[in-house]
């Protein structure tokens, strides 16, 4: 049997996906062009990297990518954000944020992200005002169903979410990024270090340092997807790796234990359920109302 040539009704299997990504790019660019100027809250993750890249293409120098620097941003993530911005010629600034000095943030209640985003907006608002711009966040459609108090702060400050407005899910973000040739297309999610601290335990620079050091050591051991969740006042580390990597983590348990305790934790445990985003949200019902 010979292969039939493709016709309009018999396209390659991936043609629909390619067309969908192209349509998503067009929607996102149209949404951004409707703004006079934007200041993108840019962490360097897949979502904010796509948004910053697209904003620069749509608005040129009327788009500014700004990275918030604090102890909750891992040094490796800061470096990656700088490298991406430099590689693509983005207008990029770093600003220091003071969430760690805010008692409501340090207390690490269920609304910690609200206070973090409030600190971010306090830093970005003067820049946006000087440019006549609006603050743009890399929120995607999938984020809307998660526990994210920061979205309330964004609504209060009038921030926009172009990825949501363009109808992009996380999968769309990755597909569009891949189409555009962005190295962040398959970058694992890397939320702030404070998201690893058990609710109710204070967020301190020391605990954040332990988490950052331990996760870097685990990646050096060959676990690219990992989380170190801090419990019991930062004495206990609950390590999450991908489900497929759990057997190897058990085989390397002595090295894993040494790496984590070497970062400053007293105890190291391996979560046999494997990595999943937002695992600490299981503690929310236990917090005082």
Image (spheres, rainbow, N blue to C red):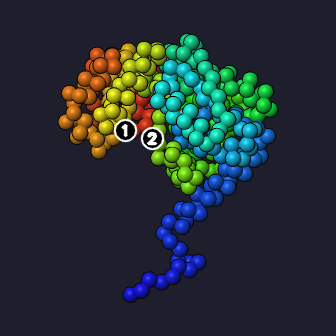
| Circle 1 crowding by C-alpha within 10 Å: few under 14, some 14–19, many from 20 | some
Q: Is residue 44 left or right of residue 92?
A: left
Q: Residue at x 38, y 38 (%)?
A: 225
Disc 1 marks which residue?
Answer: 224
Q: Is residue 225 above or below residue 117?
A: below
Q: Is residue 107 left or right of residue 68?
A: left
Query: Residue 188: which numbered mark, if any?
Result: 2
Query: Residue 112: which numbered mark, if any?
Result: none
Residue 43 coordinates in the image, percent (x, y): 56, 33
Q: In the displayed orientation, state which residue is furthest to the bottom.
A: 1
Residue 277 coordinates in the image, percent (x, y): 43, 37
Query: Can residue 80 be spotted in the picture?
Result: yes
Could you say which is closer to the camera, residue 7 or residue 102?
7
Could you say which is closer to the camera, residue 283 or residue 197?
197
Q: Quadrant of residue 99?
A: top right
Query: Can residue 139 be spotted in the picture?
Result: no
Give the Cα distance between marks 1 and 2: 8 Å
Q: Mark 1 near mark 2, Cβ–Cβ under 8 Å?
A: yes
Q: Residue at x 54, y 15 (%)?
A: 100
N-terminal label among 1 and 2: 2
Q: Quadrant of residue 235?
A: top left
Q: Is residue 281 left or right of residue 85?
A: left
Q: Is residue 116 left or right of residue 230?
A: right
Q: Residue at x 47, y 47 (%)?
A: 186
Judged from the image, the secondary structure of the residue bearing numbered disc 2 is loop
Residue 87 coordinates in the image, percent (x, y): 58, 41
Judged from the image, the secondary structure of the residue bearing numbered disc 1 is loop
Q: Residue at x 59, y 49 (%)?
A: 168
Number of numbered labels in the structure image = 2
Q: Quadrant of the N terminus?
A: bottom left
Residue 248 coordinates in the image, percent (x, y): 23, 39
| Circle 2 crowding by C-alpha within 10 Å: few under 14, some 14–19, many from 20 | few
């Amino acid at each position: 049997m010979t292969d039939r040539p493709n016709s309009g009704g018999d396209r390659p299997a991936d043609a629909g996906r390619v067309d969908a990504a192209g349509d998503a790019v067009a929607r996102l660019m149209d949404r951004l062009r409707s703004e006079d100027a934007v200041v993108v809250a840019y962490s360097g993750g897949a979502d904010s990297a796509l948004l910053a890249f697209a904003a620069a293409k749509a608005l040129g120098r009327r788009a500014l990518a700004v990275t918030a620097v604090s102890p909750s941003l891992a040094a490796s993530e800061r470096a990656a954000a700088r490298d991406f911005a430099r590689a693509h010629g983005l207008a990029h600034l770093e600003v220091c944020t003071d969430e760690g000095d805010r008692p409501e943030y340090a207390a690490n209640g269920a609304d910690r992200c609200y206070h973090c985003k409030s600190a971010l907006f306090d830093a970005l608002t003067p820049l946006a005002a000087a440019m006549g711009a609006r603050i743009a966040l890399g929120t995607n459609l999938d984020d809307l169903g998660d526990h994210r108090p920061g979205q309330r702060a964004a609504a209060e400050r009038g921030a926009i979410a172009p990825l949501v407005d363009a109808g992009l899910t996380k999968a769309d973000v990755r597909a569009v990024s891949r189409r555009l040739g962005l190295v962040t297309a398959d970058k694992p999610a890397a939320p702030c270090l404070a998201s690893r601290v058990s609710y109710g335990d204070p967020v301190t620079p020391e605990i954040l340092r332990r988490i950052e050091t331990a996760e870097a050591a685990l990646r050096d051991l060959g676990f690219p997807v990992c989380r170190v969740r801090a419990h019991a006042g930062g004495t206990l580390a609950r390590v999450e790796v991908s489900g497929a990597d759990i057997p190897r983590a058990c085989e390397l348990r002595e090295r894993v234990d040494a790496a984590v305790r070497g970062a400053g934790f007293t105890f190291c445990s391996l979560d046999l359920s494997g990595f999943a985003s937002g695992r600490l949200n299981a503690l929310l019902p236990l917090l005082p109302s």
